Image: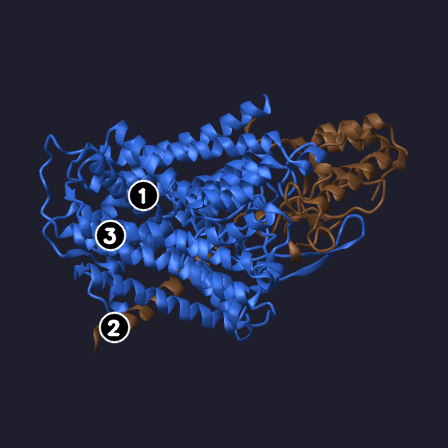
Chain colours: A blue, B brown
Amino acid sequence: MSEAAAAWLQAGLLVVLLAAAHVPLGEYLARVFTDPRHLRVERLVYRAAGVDPDADQRWSVYLRSLLAFSAVSVLVLYALLRLQDHLPLSLGRAGVPADGAWNTAVSFVTNTNWQWYSGESTMGHLVQMAGLAVQNFASAAVGLAVAIALVRGLARSRTDRVGSFWVDLVRGIGRVLLPLAFVAAVVLLVGGVVQNLAGPHEITTLAGGTQTMVGGPVASQEAIKDLGTNGGGFFNANSAHPFENPTAWTNLLEIFLLLVIPFSLPRTLGRMVGDIRQGWAITAVMGSLWAGAVWVATWAEMTGAGAVPVAAGGAMEGKEVRFGEAASALFAASTTATSTGSVNSFHDSFTGLGGGVTLLNIMLGEVTPGGVGAGLYGMLVLAVLAVFLAGLMVGRTPEYLGKKIGRHEVTLVALYVLTMPTLLLLGAALTAGIPALRDASVLNPGPHGLSEVLYAYASTANNNGSAFAGFGADTVYQNVALGLTMLAGRFVPIVLVLALAGRLAAQTPVPVGPGSLPTHRPVFVGLLAFVVVVVAGLTFFPALALGPVAEALL
Amino acid sequence: MTLPFRQHLAALRLLAVLTLVLGVGYPFAVMAVGRLVPDRADGSLVRVDGRVVGSRLIGQEFAGDQWFQPRPSVAGDGYDPMASGASNLGPQNPDLLVTVKERKAAIAARDGVPESAIPPDAVTASGSGLDPDISPAYARLQVDRVAAARGLEPAQVTALVEDHIAGPDLGFLGAAHVNVLELNLALLTLPGQGA
């Protein structure tokens, strides 16, 4: 079989698996978040936490619960990291320095999983399990909760209630993430992903040298790392590490895991608003932009343009032999399109075009299909923007799913759309513009150096977490600044989305009339895809031209 | 109690419950399942005469012409699992370009092959720095050298290489590869090559 045919089949199999999974999973998610009953074990959890599961919350209370949970999460994780030398299973590792602990605590609570550190030499097993992996579950469930609250805002009318944050959080974890992660962890284990409590130990190699073997509870963390679109590797090499991703089929499974919930959520939307076609339209936009990115990245990596790939005979720098170029590009396009940020190959060494695709994917705002929950709410915000633009063009009153888009709604949408680019460009400009900061962190010369800076701030502002890892992230300034970028990049949009949810829930639906723009037809799909690309394109074109575009043309 | 205080207290109590369930219960449950496949859960270790000589999944260095050579590694001083990772040098990086050309020249001299015959994996560092595999092309290219160093017929060694080509999974997942440690172990099973 030719390599190109194999690449098509590999991507094709992934699409088939996702197509088969998204209907049942999407329907299941809708049932989970509309079920009036609580499981007995859930009641125990609510009692332990001291919350009333039947209290339907106003958006502002929902938001305050979410922020309280996230603030406590940051503090507890920060404390665990700082104090890890006093905890069991620390493997003798020192407490994490203040700036690094701040960065990592924020990173995992915001579903970013940006990592300044190298897991195998910094983190003990307990911190990985009870600190980082717990937030892998919790941060994904928070994203899911916000998406569901927004969908309720669209689905409900004449109410000031958008659901209970506590119930959404507990169900997201208990009924969705935990069972799926457990199954995935067991399958990965069978594939060869390790799961033990071994510390580093020396062995004598076949040829008589020495090597330090490592171990850890990797399979359990790997499963939720991908399923929750988190991305923080147990080891520095992340999913390129053979203990995290040993074979080509575990690789495909991991790509499936990171895409499956984001691609199922449009179905949940369709079910909850009572019109499956609306979900199809959103899936179509997400799917076509993802497929385009996969195609371009795969072509670029298999072609292997650039001085180094040409000299080597192929773009294999930073890639593993068992995956090859195609499976590496498929992973790269998917991890950057979902705000996951785990990597099975190192994007910094991709060809100019392939690396540019990963950067552009992130800059699109993580909506193709985006992170767990965050992808859906991001795309719905852009859908509101799209109907507003269409309304301006043809003079119709803009409405989406029966809700009028007035001045107040558009203001929230505009603020949402501006938040990420502001954080990204401001942060990147400071690092690129101040020589001391630039020299401390930029490894590669020329346009590639600018790409590294842009990638770092795109990744953190969008809660992706992957890197052009040549970027020297472990400085006090970058740890603090990137931490602030992640925090604002996560929670400012969440505030705006929940405000929008409350606003929409309170409306009386307008009946569909001849003046309504149908939002399930191909015209709208095209319009929304156009909006996604143009919003990012216009914002970032100058920066992209100086970085990856310049590099691809060199 | 004020609302914000109650919210933070509830958050703290819920996080404690979640930490117990997700941070302790879940990984230990997976670990219990791992006891059913201890070989996999413990890192696919390879033993020779009862002594662990490495992991099937983790590449290692082999000093000497009598061994098949793995890919270049930038993990620590090479194949150090305490420092997994890639070079992160870009596609136009001048230093990396020099390194690749030097590696190419060195292999051409070592194996007596034209530079054009050297596959890309032989001159590039992997993503993990622990890549256990090489491409079939890089394995075949090393046959003559390994056979000469061991006083074997090239045909014997070629047969071993062809036996050890694995993948792509299902014929189209990932790429064909040869596990270097397993191939080198197999060399020791040939007549007169006892470990």
The nearer-to-camera label among 3 and 2 is 3
Indicate which disc residue A28 carries. none
Residue occupying the point 34% across, 35% down: A529
Q: Is residue A350 visible?
A: yes
Kind of residue at disc 1: Met
* Chain of the residue displaying label 2: B
The furthest residue to the bottom: B1
Q: Are marks 2 and 1 on the same chain?
A: no
Q: Is residue A280 above or below residue A489?
A: above
Q: Nearer the viewer, residue A171 or B117?
A: B117
Q: Is residue A525 above or below residue A420?
A: above
Left or right relative to A44: residue B78: right
In the rendered image, which residue does mark 2 sit on?
B4
Q: Are marks 3 and 1 on the same chain?
A: yes
Secondary structure type for disc 2? helix
Q: Are marks 3 and 2 on the same chain?
A: no
Q: Local crowd at mark 2 within 10 Å, few (<14), some, or many (≥20)?
A: few
The nearer-to-camera label among 2 and 1 is 1
Q: Local crowd at mark 1 within 10 Å, few (<14), some, or many (≥20)?
A: many
Kind of residue at disc 2: Pro
Secondary structure type for disc 1? helix
Residue A71 locus on image (x, y percent): 36, 68
Q: Nearer the viewer, residue A221 or A3?
A: A3
Secondary structure type for disc 3? helix
* Chain of the residue displaying label 1: A
Give how far apart the Cα atoms at labels 2 and 1 are. Answer: 31 Å
Kind of residue at disc 3: Thr
Residue occupying the point 89% across, 37% down: B149
Residue A72 locus on image (x, y percent): 36, 69
Q: Nearer the viewer, residue A504 or A326?
A: A504
In the rendered image, which residue does mark 3 sit on?
A411
